[in-house]
Amino acid sequence: MLSVVLITGVAGFMGSHLADEFLAKGYKVKGIDNFLGGYPSNVPAGVDFLEADLDDLSKIESKFEGVDLVVHAACTAYEGLSVFSPSLISRNTFQISANVISASIKHKVDKFVMLSSMARYGTQISLPFVETMQPLPQDPYGIAKVASEMLLKNMSETHGMKYTIVVPHNIIGSRQKYDDPFRNVASIMINRMLQGKQPVIYGDGNQKRCFSFMKDVTNPILTACESDLVNGLTINIGPDEEFITINELASRIANIIGFELNPIYLPGRPQEVLNANCSADLARKLLSYQTTTSLNDGLTELIEWIKISKPRRFNYHLPIEFVTDKTPVSWTTDLFNE
Ligand SMILES: NC(=O)c1ccc[n+]([C@@H]2O[C@H](COP(=O)([O-])OP(=O)(O)OC[C@H]3O[C@@H](n4cnc5c(N)ncnc54)[C@H](O)[C@@H]3O)[C@@H](O)[C@H]2O)c1
């Protein structure tokens, strides 16, 4: 029997791609977003859409009627900014999760899938991060994600809702916000280089990350939604291959674009995790995860999409709650547009 799925954050990067896949599989898809981060044009045709702030429980609650599956993708996933805007990020990470969980339980949703973040791991004594490690978040965003996870586990176990927590990491692909000065490092670099501007790197650029291509994570996330094998589990989804420095990322993008690289280095951001890499072993075993797109191919596709969508001025669209001597100058001035 076909099911009804409700996707929060459906106007965002991941939520909109997931909506496409659910529609293609014949699901009835409902979605909620307030466009704090996403674009109206991202919402796929065919989605039964409600423009609303998930912080307003009374406004969103009836949308959950008749829903079998909830995919909770909505969030302000601004790890660096959260250190200077903890109230904004907590509200749009933890508080909205509490509302979505509450409405789901009230309307007897069968399964709840939450998109968490590798920020949950913080700095561990060894790499890669595996799901059995104790979460050690080290910034307000990671703390709000872990608190949301704990609330989901607690409420699901108490009230009998199936759940899975998936942990995607550093995804790239079309529809990603690339005019946002606060997040999406690869897209920011591409947007600047396509405007003839040098990329901005925080710290010495030797911090290391793995990057995932959206098409490689879509099906494993759908499998996590449909499979009872992963109920009650937290599971990383994304590659553990091509673990590279941010300097190397800049250099690969510059090579693909044909840009002469001379990055602008700014002081490191407070609380930034130096090396972050998740093991994909559990996802390979339970969700048939496979990395099929190399980083260079993924970056090439992203660059082509940003070229077609046209490079844009950066939009400083979120408030910084307080400024200290640790606030990056790229956020307190218009540096990204210079
Ligand atoms: N993209 C990544 O690399 C990545 C990595 C790890 C985890 N995640 C997680 O995956 C999820 C989706 O990330 P994304 O990259 O697609 O982000 P995104 O910003 O593109 O999408 C999130 C959407 O949530 C919406 N939203 C935020 N607050 C809202 C509110 N109060 N009410 C209604 N809608 C609201 C935004 O408008 C946006 O459209 C997030 O939970 C994020 O933490 C993403």
Image (tube, rainbow, N blue to C red):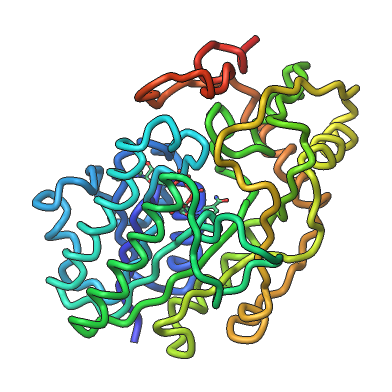
Q: Relative to residue 74, is residue 123 drawn left or right? A: right
Residue at x 20%, y 81% (from the top left corner): 158
Where is residue 243? Give x, y as percent: 79, 56
Residue at x 50%, y 15% (from the top left corner): 332
Number of marks present in the image shown: 0
Residue at x 51%, y 48% (from the top left corner): 13
Which quadrant holds the C terminus? Answer: top right
Tell which residue pokes out farthest to the left in this image: 58
Residue at x 46%, y 86% (from the top left corner): 227
Q: In terms of depth relative to the viewer, which is nearer, 207 or 134?
A: 134
Note whether 147 is above or below 158 in the view shown: above
Note whether 18 is above or below 113 in the view shown: above
Which quadrant holds the N terminus? Answer: bottom left
Quadrant assignment, res 188:
top right
Note whether 22 is above or below 51 in the view shown: below
Q: Relative to residue 280, is residue 77 drawn left or right? A: left
Where is residue 72? Give x, y as percent: 36, 61
Tell which residue pokes out farthest to the bottom in this image: 229
Q: In terms of depth relative to the viewer, which is nearer, 184 or 321?
A: 321
Where is residue 110? Give x, y as percent: 27, 81
Tell which residue pokes out farthest to the front in this image: 125
Q: Relative to residue 250, is residue 116 drawn left or right? A: left
Where is residue 32? Give x, y as percent: 29, 51
Quadrant assignment, res 335:
top right
Q: In terms of depth relative to the viewer, which is nearer, 145 or 325?
A: 325
Q: In terms of depth relative to the viewer, which is nearer, 26 or 284?
A: 284
Q: Relative to residue 268, is residue 89 drawn left or right? A: left
